[in-house]
């Protein structure tokens, strides 16, 4: 009935039977997850929020709400993964020359969940959420091309994340790292549910991302407003387009690899086994055929965010727009030609290594160009160093350092000595933290007021910035040194006392990063409490340049009363300059928006059930889950009435109310940007 | 693993006894201090100075491969400085000069491109990448891990196991587990396979690293220039005992190596099929040397792992 599942699998039972430090820590983590879930249920019940949650959020097909749900999901997962990182560093520090609190197996689960979460359930949902929110607004669209598919993508991603969370309480997670290298993850070497949890969580997430990629690309191709040619799009839309193309092509090898691994494990296939014709080198190739473009899937959206931030907060148009577009496209294409640099050490010929090494360095060219263009964007501008800009400027410096070590690692000869070491770990954190996380935090700072109608508290933003940046440098610079001293990744303990001080500094850094997360939470809390004084109802708190700032904050469900027409880049800046930004359109018509649908939540629950069932070999539940998920999709195809009509009168009233609010608003200059005075109306030319 | 750590400590103690380094003595002093975390801020600089054997990795190259890698490392740093330093210099200047409010810089909100600058921005990285690319090509070919470093290399067959390395000396006929003794100054040719999952073999101070994979044979050519003790390890996570899968590689002067060989042949036990059976389990292992091993063991490991060898006898028989 319950497949391989028994009481022993539950973390609390395990800790009861074997109260070791490692199991107790596991039980505490499981307890936190359960408590968090229960607290959410209780709060929703006490405040009677189930119905608003269901009709306002879970079944909504509004790209803005889906985007926000993606971001909430990613922040929850971020918290878990950062805590795991700090725990690992603490363990390693204590374990120098002696035993640490965690068992090696528990430690391995931690680095596996940390990586899996950070990539698939923190980074991907975070950038997908930002794209979801911002991109349709920037191209002057009312929604993405396939709103239901959008919700289903979120459902699949959330289901994957749920599986990872469930593994905290029931059973164990994989110990094979986020990359899940075969043959270690084959049944012969990794028995039990761990790898299966990883396989299904990642498979669900990769399916969700593939669908997102398709959705975004089609949206950009088909839903741009009149006059918005490709080369008039904000750069964030360009990076979104490139990321979407990468998602479409790069997620497939991952899905293939995880499904093949599943076939090996469940059905006795031999894709990646040692024997019977299997070959784990194919796994490495497939995984990194996904894995390297994935790096750029993660980084490009942040490049887009930074482009917007540098331009907006320098009060100046983006320097070298065309060069940045070309550079982005170059990176997107080249990213498919370098995957082999993740395994220079696999024994192939030197010529192959040289080719891939040079291809890898070639990516440095467009990336270097971008850095110069961003720098030049600030030249002849008026730079306001508020939170998003602080992150952006720090990104420039930090990312350049990461690029330097990246060029080092691109050389097979150098890579031979530091491959798999903490030098590598330091390098990719050095790329992804400034190149993804800082960008996304900056994005949250920039677009939060658009989404919720009030700004985030600047003081806590700066405090968070200080914690993040100091934490990053302290946490990862020592890892470069350790890597050069022969410390390898995924090592639970070292007998080498000279590592101690470096690890202590790294731990301090990890704690500061936790402080950064805390500051973000405090910023949100404080901002909500002071939302009246931080309110920006008019919707343009930063003197924005692109169309998303041309609608109220928060925007109505339909985004734009009438679809805007543009004739240049920086569309909103031009509209403001020409005095056309805030007019009453005379051609308001009835519009249709997608009606709510319960398909996505059903698919989410069904996917969690199926994934869990397959992990534990509970076949009846797997069949039931699949039937429910596909049943929902089939049932939906019989629904004819999928739209909701919004009459022109509603639109007109809403627009009039906004204009009325606007007339009562005093424009602020950029000097008053972070003041309570800033109600979201920018003073012209200041 | 407690056992393995104990053995580790013992081995060090023995080494200190045989006078192979004051360094080892210093290390144990540090070991006593480290757990007291509250002392770290004060002790940090002291410890850095005291723990002399932080020397590891290519910066402390002990062989031609690592030396070449180190030189290449600084070559890259030099070229990259051309691209990076201007940014570090220009950024604070730009932030200051064009700051909102009191910045002295001209404000030109529409300024978006300048042909000469654009050319420079593309040309500089291109030139750097061309220079680095040429060097990359040369070095990659020159340091091809399959390329012997000189005539008459000594072959060592490496069998990566869970969680230990088995070293076989096909010409000398001896074998060892988790300890490796080689002659200094003579090219070394490591031939690697794995009896289990994929692993990666590295001795950082000699440079180079290569995967050992089941049913496949890879090669790594290294050399230790002078006698010394170097750390080696598996770098690819392969289960609970991963952190213990480390070994010390001792490079000896040729006559000392010959004496070691003679001693090993005379005193050490042979690697019998029973010993192999005990090694072929997922467990950590203490360092050990063996006077002899069944000929053709390496090839049989490859075959067995590949599934083409005898399924009943095991690789050792």
Image (cartoon, coloured by chain):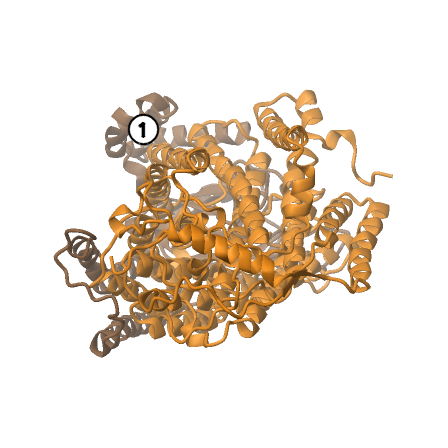
Chain colours: A orange, B brown
Q: Is residue A324 left or right of residue A640?
A: left
Outermost residue, left side? B104
User: Does residue A334 appear anywhere in the picture?
Assistant: yes
Answer left or right for A4 relative to A648. Answer: right
Crowdedness near tag 1: few (<14), some (14–19) or many (≥20) residues, C-alpha within 10 Å: some
Location of the N terminus of chain A (image quadrant):
top right
Rendered position, A575 above or below B63: below
Instruction: Count how many numbered circles sit on residues in the image.
Output: 1
Quarter of the image with the C terminus of chain A in it: bottom left
In-front residue for pair A37/B157:
A37
Q: Chain of mark 1?
A: B
Tell me residue A625's x, y (percent).
80, 50
Looking at the image, which is closer to me, A25 or A43? Answer: A43
- Residue B257 location in percent, x, y? 39, 48
Q: What residue would you read off at disc 1?
A: B25
Relative to A449, say whether B46 is above or below: above
Q: Residue at x 74, y 46 (%)?
A: A605
In the rendered image, which quarter is residue A357 located in?
bottom left
Q: Position of residue B175 (x, y in %)?
A: 53, 47
In the rendered image, is residue B288 in sight? Answer: no
Q: Secondary structure at mark 1?
A: helix
- Judge from the rendering whether residue A90 lies leftward or rightward of residue A2; answer left or right: left
Which residue is pictured at 30% across the width and 42% down the height? Answer: A675
What x and y, as percent, mark residue B206?
A: 36, 53
Q: Residue drawn at (45%, 38%), measured in percent from left and top?
A: A524
Q: Could you say which quadrant of the image residue A132 lies in?
A: bottom right
Q: Please tell me whether residue A353 is drawn above or below residue B55 in the rendered image.
A: below
Question: Is A205 above or below relative to A75?
Answer: below
Q: Closest to the observer: B19 or A359?
A: A359
């Amino acid at each position: 009935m319950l497949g391989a599942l028994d009481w022993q699998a539950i973390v609390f039972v395990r800790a009861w039977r074997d109260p070791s430090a490692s199991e107790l820590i596991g039980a505490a983590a499981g307890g936190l997850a359960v408590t968090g879930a229960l607290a959410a249920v209780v709060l929703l019940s006490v405040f009677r929020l189930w119905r608003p949650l269901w009709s306002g959020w879970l079944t909504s097909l509004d790209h803005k709400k889906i985007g926000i749900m993606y971001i909430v999901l990613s922040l929850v997962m971020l918290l878990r993964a950062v805590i795991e990182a700090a725990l690992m560093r603490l363990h390693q520090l204590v374990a120098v020359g002696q035993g640490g609190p965690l068992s090696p197996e528990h430690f391995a689960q931690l680095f596996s969940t940390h990586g899996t979460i950070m990539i698939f359930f923190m980074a991907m949902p975070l950038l997908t959420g930002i794209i979801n929110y911002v991109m349709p607004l920037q191209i002057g669209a009312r929604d993405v091309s396939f709103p239901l598919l959008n919700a289903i993508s979120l459902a699949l991603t959330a289901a994957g994340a749920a599986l990872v969370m469930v593994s905290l309480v029931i059973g164990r997670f994989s110990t094979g790292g986020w990359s899940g290298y075969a043959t270690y993850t084959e049944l012969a070497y990794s028995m039990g549910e761990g790898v299966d949890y990883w396989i299904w969580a990642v498979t669900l997430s990769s399916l969700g991302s593939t669908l997102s990629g398709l959705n975004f690309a089609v949206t950009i191709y088909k839903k741009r407003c009149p006059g918005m040619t490709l080369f008039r799009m904000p750069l964030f839309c360009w990076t979104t387009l490139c990321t979407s193309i990468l998602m479409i092509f790069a997620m497939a090898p991952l899905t293939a690899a995880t499904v093949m691994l599943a076939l090996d494990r469940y059905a006795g296939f031999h894709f990646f086994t040692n024997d019977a014709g299997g070959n784990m080198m194919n796994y490495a190739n497939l995984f990194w055929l996904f894995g390297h473009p994935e790096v750029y899937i993660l980084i490009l959206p942040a490049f887009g965010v930074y482009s917007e931030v540098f331009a907006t907060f320098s009060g100046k148009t983006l320097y070298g727009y065309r060069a940045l577009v070309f550079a982005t496209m170059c990176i997107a294409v080249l990213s498919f030609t370098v995957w082999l640099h993740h395994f220079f050490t696999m024994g192939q010929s030197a010529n192959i290594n040289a080719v891939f090494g040079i291809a890898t360095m070639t990516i440095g060219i467009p990336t270097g160009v971008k850095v110069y263009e961003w720098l030049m964007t600030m030249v002849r501008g008026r730079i306001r160093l508020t939170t998003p800009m602080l992150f952006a400027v720090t990104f420039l410096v930090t990312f350049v350092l990461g690029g330097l070590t990246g060029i080092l690692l691109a050389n097979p000869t150098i890579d031979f000595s530091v491959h798999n070491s903490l030098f590598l770990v330091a390098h990719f954190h050095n790329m992804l933290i400034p190149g993804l996380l800082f960008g996304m935090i900056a994005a949250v700072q920039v677009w939060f007021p658009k989404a919720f109608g009030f700004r985030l508290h600047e003081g806590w933003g700066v405090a968070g910035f200080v914690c993040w940046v100091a934490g990053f440098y302290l946490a990862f610079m020592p890892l470069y040194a350790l890597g050069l001293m022969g410390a390898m990744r995924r090592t639970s303990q070292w007998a080498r006392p000279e590592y101690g001080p470096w690890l202590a500094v790294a731990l301090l850094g990890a704690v500061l990063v936790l402080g950064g997360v805390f500051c973000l939470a405090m910023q949100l809390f404080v901002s909500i409490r002071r939302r009246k004084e931080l309110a920006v109802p008019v919707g343009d708190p930063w003197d924005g340049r692109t169309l998303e700032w041309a609608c109220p904050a928060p925007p109505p469900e339909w985004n734009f009363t009438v679809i805007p027409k543009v004739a240049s880049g920086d569309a909103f800046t031009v509209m403001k300059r020409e005095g056309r930004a805030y007019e009453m359109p005379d051609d308001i018509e009835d519009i249709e928006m997608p009606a709510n649908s319960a398909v996505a939540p059903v698919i989410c629950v069904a996917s969690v059930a199926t994934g869990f069932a397959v992990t534990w070999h509970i076949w009846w539940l797997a069949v039931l889950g699949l039937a429910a998920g596909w049943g929902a999709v089939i049932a939906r195809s019989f629904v004819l009435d999928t739209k909701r009509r919004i009459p022109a009168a509603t639109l007109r009233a809403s627009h009039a109310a906004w204009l009325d609010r606007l007339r009562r608003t005093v424009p602020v200059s950029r000097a008053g940007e972070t003041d309570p005075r800033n109600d979201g109306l920018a003073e012209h030319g200041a | 693993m407690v056992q393995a750590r104990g053995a580790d400590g013992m081995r060090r103690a023995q080494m200190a006894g045989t006078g192979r380094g004051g360094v080892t003595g210093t290390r144990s002093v540090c070991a006593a201090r480290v757990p007291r975390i509250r002392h770290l801020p004060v002790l940090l600089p002291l410890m850095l100075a005291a723990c002399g054997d932080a020397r590891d990795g290519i910066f402390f190259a002990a062989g031609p491969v690592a030396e070449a890698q180190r030189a290449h490392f600084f070559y890259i740093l030099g070229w990259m400085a051309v691209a990076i330093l201007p940014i570090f210099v220009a950024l604070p200047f730009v932030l200051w000069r064009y700051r909102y409010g009191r910045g002295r810089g001209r404000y030109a909100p529409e300024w978006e491109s300048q042909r000469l600058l654009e050319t420079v921005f593309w040309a500089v990285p291109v030139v750097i990448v061309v220079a680095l690319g040429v060097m990359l090509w040369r070095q990659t070919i020159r340091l091809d891990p399959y390329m012997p470093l000189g005539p008459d290399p000594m072959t060592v067959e490496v069998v990566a196991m869970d969680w230990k390395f088995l070293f076989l000396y096909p010409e000398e006929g001896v074998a060892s587990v988790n300890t490796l003794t080689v002659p200094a100054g003579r090219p070394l040719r490591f031939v690697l396979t794995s009896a289990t999952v994929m692993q990666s073999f590295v001795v950082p101070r000699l440079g180079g690293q290569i995967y050992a994979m089941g049913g496949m044979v890879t090669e790594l050519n290294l050399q230790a220039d002078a006698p010394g003790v170097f750390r080696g390890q598996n770098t690819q996570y392969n289960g609970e005992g991963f952190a213990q899968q480390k070994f010390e590689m001792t490079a000896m002067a040729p006559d000392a190596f010959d004496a070691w060989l003679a001693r090993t042949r005379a005193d050490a036990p042979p690697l019998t099929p029973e010993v192999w059976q005990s090694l072929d389990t997922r467990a950590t292992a203490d360092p050990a040397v063996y006077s002899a091993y069944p000929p053709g063991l390496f090839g049989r490991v490859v075959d067995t792992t590949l599934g083409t060898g005898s399924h009943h006898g095991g690789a050792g028989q």
